[in-house]
Image (spheres, rainbow, N blue to C red):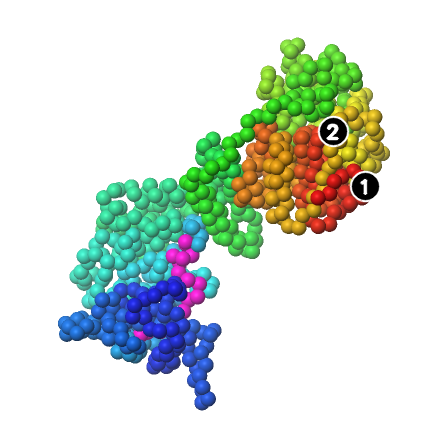
């Protein structure tokens, strides 16, 4: 029942009072609510023996007491029927008999969707009837908790409600006050009709056996004619049909339906409201038909309503939300609001994937997932209506040095910024294929960009391909010239039909397999230039048969040209990544540390930060970035699900962060908000960060790296920095970083 524990109702019986029925005695435990003709209580059944009594705390009942507002007089434990005026007493007595008749009529109902009545009795000068107590609360309360219900759940519930109402009509009984507040949910979430205070029973001749007069009902659920309806021998089921449509409206929108007068005077009111809520056309049409302001145009029977319902095609909640969010004008949103939009899209796409997964257990969880999504969407809509002061999107970062004095952060570098090895490789060669290999930070991507620009300046046709979407965007957004439309990431290039060009330039060539490399060679009309890391591809861990630089050399017949110097990696970070991650020079092609190779003047020690909870790690990241005023930050994590969960955490505390997330289904399931022209922190997986570089790299939730593939991925992540590295871990620092000498890092 709808509980009102703190509600004080005049005339209500005191808590603990005993009532003696015909079959059982009861102890009042709680006042649940009040209507026009009664007060409802929660009570315990009393079991009596020779030595005493026992209240059953496990078998509660609901007791409805006849109590007319304005007429019944309460004195102590006694409720009198009327006032001192004889005509009022007579009036009250008439309705008391109707109240008793209501209980009898209800007791005759034998349907699982109608509340069960145990007995009726008189006590303290008034009448009572006892019915089952439903612990879960009303449908109205459930809707408020969920904000609104999915179409699938709404259709399921309204069908069961309709079946119970149809049974009532078969028994020649009208409810006349059907609404979510008068529908309870049992322990299995099945709907149960209650509160028949306005109900009316008709005999087979059409004569009404009124338990009360027909009242106004409840605004939004009662048609216009109910206010003035007088029985003329007709059994007007359309009164309840209107309320049935209103109940479905409330479930789908979370709002009380418009008043009947509003629907009559402003045609289209229902349609506009339902369309605004994204409700399917078929359910919109059903509600319009059931709630037609003209009785003759309304659905006439419950069976007709259920038949129309069975033909309705509920929308898939996930795709409704996806379409709604994709239509949003993100330019008008704050950074954090855009983050929330993308997270909701991910949640909706996960739900869409779940719906295609077979299995009863999976399907049983769909309703809860759909309702969670709708709650989050409603919360998002509400938040957007509130003006919140937020920091503006940071302005584009000014060029900063990435590789020390030799190579600038911007990709538009001139030859004065290159060393002898880099200059030798670039030269003026346009006719001979090149295979260039170097460690992280050796300037491979810079040379690839420079070579592409050389070709463009000479009037040549060139396509530059990167393996990851992140690297492609990183390179293209830092190159404001004619090359911008000649960048592709690999999947994009393939799905554009693998276009040819005079020159094909590929970065991170070690991440491709033999077939893909042959496709690049075939697409180059004149010549190809491949750039790769001397370390083997980290994608072998995903089952991809990538080729090493040496294997690519054998395949193409092109000699490897090496870049030896590293201008990006600070020496302390280089010492750790080259010597303490458990990677081997022969097997993994990771060269042992040498001072001569690493040219960076940065000597900031990496920081290992001990934390004790997830929440602490999130707050520490926010503090690290904010207090140090870091403006070029990469937050790198091992897997995509961690990206998703962290973005929820960041969004929850109002922390702006761009991200790349891949559900792993297909290219359409990427969510990529990375914009390398802003100073907003970037969140992505270790693998997505290949080829990128940041002033500050933060590695949260570090739990160690056991396998060779995990260590290679950690290597990629740590070598993305040109200044700062922070590793956040839970209580215990795991291998391989636990083996790093203490003089190579700072601990917090």
Which numbered disc covers residue 602? 2
x, y percentage for residue 578?
80, 34
In the rendered view, tell whether residue 255 sits above or below residue 171.
above
Q: Residue at 57% across / 35% down in the picture?
A: 658
Q: Splitting the image into 4 quarters, where does residue 387 fall?
A: top left
Residue 106 visible in the displayed image: no
x, y percentage for residue 541?
73, 40
Q: Splitting the image into 4 quarters, where does residue 482 fall?
A: top right
Q: Which residue is the extreme one toward the top?
A: 458
Q: Give the secondary structure at mark 2.
A: loop
Q: Give the secondary structure at mark 1.
A: loop
Viewed as shown, does residue 151 lie left or right of 707? Answer: left
How packed mark 2 is, by other alpha carbons closer than 10 Å (few <14, some 14-19, many 20 or more), is some
x, y percentage for residue 705?
75, 44
In front: 379, or 296?
A: 379
Please give the range of residues in magenta.
128-144
Q: Which residue is the extreme one toward the front?
A: 627
In the rendered view, tell whether residue 710 sits above or below residue 142.
above
* Cβ–Cβ under 8 Å for marks 2 and 1: no
Q: Residue at 47% across / 50% down in the picture?
A: 371
Residue linked to disc 1? 741
């Amino acid at each position: 029942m709808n509980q009102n524990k703190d509600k004080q109702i005049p005339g209500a019986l005191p808590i603990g009072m005993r009532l003696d029925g015909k079959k059982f005695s009861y102890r009042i435990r709680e006042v649940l609510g009040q209507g026009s003709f009664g007060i409802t209580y929660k009570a315990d059944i009393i079991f009596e023996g020779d030595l005493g009594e026992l209240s059953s705390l496990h078998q509660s009942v609901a007791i409805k007491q006849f109590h007319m507002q304005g007429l019944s007089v309460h004195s102590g434990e006694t409720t009198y029927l009327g006032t001192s005026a004889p005509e009022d007493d007579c009036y009250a007595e008439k309705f008391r008999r109707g109240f008793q008749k209501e209980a009898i009529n209800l007791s005759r109902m034998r349907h699982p969707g109608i509340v069960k009545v145990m007995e009726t009795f008189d006590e303290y000068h008034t009448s009572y009837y006892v019915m089952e107590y439903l612990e879960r609360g009303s449908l109205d309360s459930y809707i408020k908790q969920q904000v609104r219900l999915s179409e699938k759940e709404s259709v399921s519930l309204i069908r069961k409600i309709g079946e119970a109402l149809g049974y009532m009509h078969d028994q020649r009984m009208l409810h006349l006050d059907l609404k979510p507040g008068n529908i309870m949910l049992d322990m299995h979430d099945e709907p149960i009709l209650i509160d028949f205070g306005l109900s009316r029973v008709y005999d087979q001749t059409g004569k009404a056996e009124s338990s009360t007069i027909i009242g106004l009902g409840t605004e939004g659920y009662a048609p216009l004619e109910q206010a003035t309806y007088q029985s003329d021998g007709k059994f007007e089921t359309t009164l309840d049909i209107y309320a049935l449509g209103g109940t479905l409206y409330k479930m789908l929108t979370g709002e009380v339906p418009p008043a009947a007068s509003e629907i009559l005077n402003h045609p289209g009111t229902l349609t506009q409201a339902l369309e605004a809520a994204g409700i399917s056309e078929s359910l919109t049409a059903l509600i319009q038909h059931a709630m037609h302001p003209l009785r003759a145009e309304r659905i006439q029977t419950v069976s007709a309503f259920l038949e129309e319902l069975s033909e309705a095609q509920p929308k898939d909640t996930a795709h409704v939300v996806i379409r709604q969010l994709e239509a949003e004008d993100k330019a008008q949103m704050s950074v954090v609001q855009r983050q929330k939009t993308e997270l909701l899209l991910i949640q909706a796409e996960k739900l869409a994937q779940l719906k295609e997964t077979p299995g009863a257990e999976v399907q049983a969880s769909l309703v809860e997932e759909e309702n969670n999504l709708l709650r989050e969407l409603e919360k998002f809509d509400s938040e957007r209506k509130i003006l919140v002061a937020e920091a503006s999107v940071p302005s584009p970062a000014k060029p900063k040095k990435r590789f020390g004095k030799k190579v600038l952060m911007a990709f538009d570098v001139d030859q004065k910024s290159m060393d002898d090895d880099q200059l030798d490789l670039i030269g003026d060669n346009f006719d001979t294929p090149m295979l260039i290999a170097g460690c992280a930070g050796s300037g491979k991507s810079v040379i690839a960009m420079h070579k592409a620009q050389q070709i463009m300046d000479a009037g040549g046709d060139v396509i530059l391909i990167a393996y990851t979407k992140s690297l492609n965007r990183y390179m293209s957004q830092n190159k404001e010239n004619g090359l911008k439309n000649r960048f592709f990431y690999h999947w994009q290039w393939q799905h554009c039909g693998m276009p040819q060009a005079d020159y094909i330039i590929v970065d991170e060539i070690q991440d491709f397999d033999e077939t893909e490399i042959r496709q690049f060679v075939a697409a180059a009309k004149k010549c190809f230039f491949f750039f790769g890391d001397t370390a083997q591809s980290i994608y072998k861990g995903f089952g991809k048969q990538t080729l090493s630089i040496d294997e690519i050399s054998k395949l193409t017949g092109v000699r490897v040209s090496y870049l030896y110097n590293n201008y990006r990696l600070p020496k302390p970070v280089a010492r750790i990544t080259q010597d303490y991650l458990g990677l081997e020079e022969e097997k993994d092609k990771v060269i042992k540390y040498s001072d001569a190779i690493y040219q960076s003047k940065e000597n900031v020690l990496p920081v290992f930060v001990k934390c004790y909870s997830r929440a602490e790690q999130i707050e520490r990241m926010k503090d690290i970035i904010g207090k140090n005023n870091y403006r070029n930050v990469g937050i790198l994590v091992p897997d995509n699900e961690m990206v998703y969960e962290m973005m929820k955490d960041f969004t929850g505390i109002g922390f702006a962060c761009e991200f790349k997330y891949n559900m792993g289904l297909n290219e359409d399931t990427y969510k990529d908000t990375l914009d390398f022209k802003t100073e907003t922190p970037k969140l992505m997986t270790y693998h997505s960060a290949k080829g990128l570089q940041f002033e500050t790299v933060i590695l949260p939730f570090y739990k160690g790296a056991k396998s060779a593939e995990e260590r290679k991925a950690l290597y990629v992540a740590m070598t993305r920095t040109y200044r700062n590295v922070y590793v956040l871990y839970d209580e215990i620092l795991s291998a391989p970083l636990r083996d790093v000498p203490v003089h190579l890092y700072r601990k917090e």
